[in-house]
Image: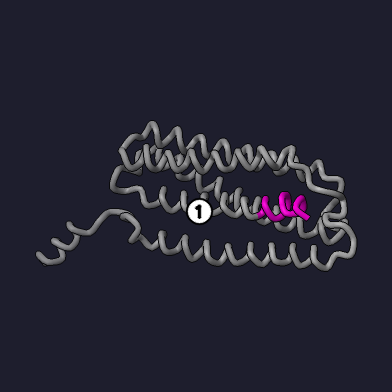
Amino acid sequence: MAEAELRAQTLPVGSFGRRSSGWYGVWCLIGTEGAIFLYLLFSYFYLAAQSSGRWPPQGLPSLELAGPNTGVLLLSSVALYWAERSGARRGSRARLLVGLGSALLLGSVFAAVQWREWHDKAFGLGSDNYASIYFTVTGFHLAHVVIGLLVLVVLFLWAALGYFDRDRHAALTIGAVYWHFVDAVWLAVFTALYLVPRLS
């Protein structure tokens, strides 16, 4: 009986550090989702190589919205990194909330601008091979952004309720890893769909 009580007293409450199951889980998720994005980008380059006409058929994609929008998404990662480093790890709830709120706002702006860019396209999902792969790749990424935004909303609420401190912020770290993955994937998508066609 005394041994069971001792164990109960020494067990941590909630996930702690990188030893939490969520830490390994998010890396497994990133591995599988990263592979899917690699397959999609491979399909894009395969279709480009098989195309007998110009690629993209409608001409080079505009950087007017996509360029600044990429900067917005990268800033959201910076804000989230700052929230974790300067807020959670130093025990500052105010900095944590400002960083999380900024990341959430910037991520929402990215999603809205991406939606606007889709709306402004002169082609639709079924127009041709390029249109199909463009909307599939960017749509799959946008779905990940939306999931990431939901994660950020939950993390913001938990931070506001005081669930995180200097020692217990594993959920924040895990959510941040996912968000940084989403941003890194966008860099690959942006390079493949917007920049590479300008090189050929």
Q: Against 55, is 154 above or below? A: above
Using the rendered view, name the quadrant where residue 55 is placed: bottom right
Task: Give the colouring mode of the picture.
Answer: one colour
What residue do we see at 38% from left, 31% from top? 94
Q: Against 133, is 76 above or below? A: above
What residue do we see at 57% from left, 49% from top? 183
What residue do we see at 40% from left, 43% from top? 84
Between 195 and 22, the residue placed more toward the observer is 195
How many residues crowd mark 1 within 10 Å: few (<14), some (14–19), many (20+)?
many
Between 49 and 178, the residue placed more toward the observer is 49
Q: Is residue 72 left or right of residue 12?
A: right
Between 197 and 167, the residue placed more toward the observer is 197
Q: Is residue 180 left or right of residue 129?
A: left
Question: Circle 1 is placed at which residue position?
Answer: 178
Range shown magenta:
189-200
Q: Position of residue 103 (x, y in %)?
A: 52, 39
Q: Is residue 142 left or right of residue 117?
A: left
Q: Is residue 193 magenta?
A: yes
Q: Against 91, is 123 above or below? A: below
Q: Tell me the quadrant of the picture where the C terminus can be found.
A: bottom right
Between 109 and 12, the residue placed more toward the observer is 109
Q: Against 153, is 128 above or below? A: below
Q: Tell me the quadrant of the picture where the N terminus can be found.
A: bottom left
Q: Position of residue 191 (x, y in %)?
A: 67, 52
Using the rendered view, name the quadrant where residue 134 is placed: bottom right
Q: Position of residue 171 (x, y in %)?
A: 40, 51
- Magenta stretch mostly in which secondary structure? helix
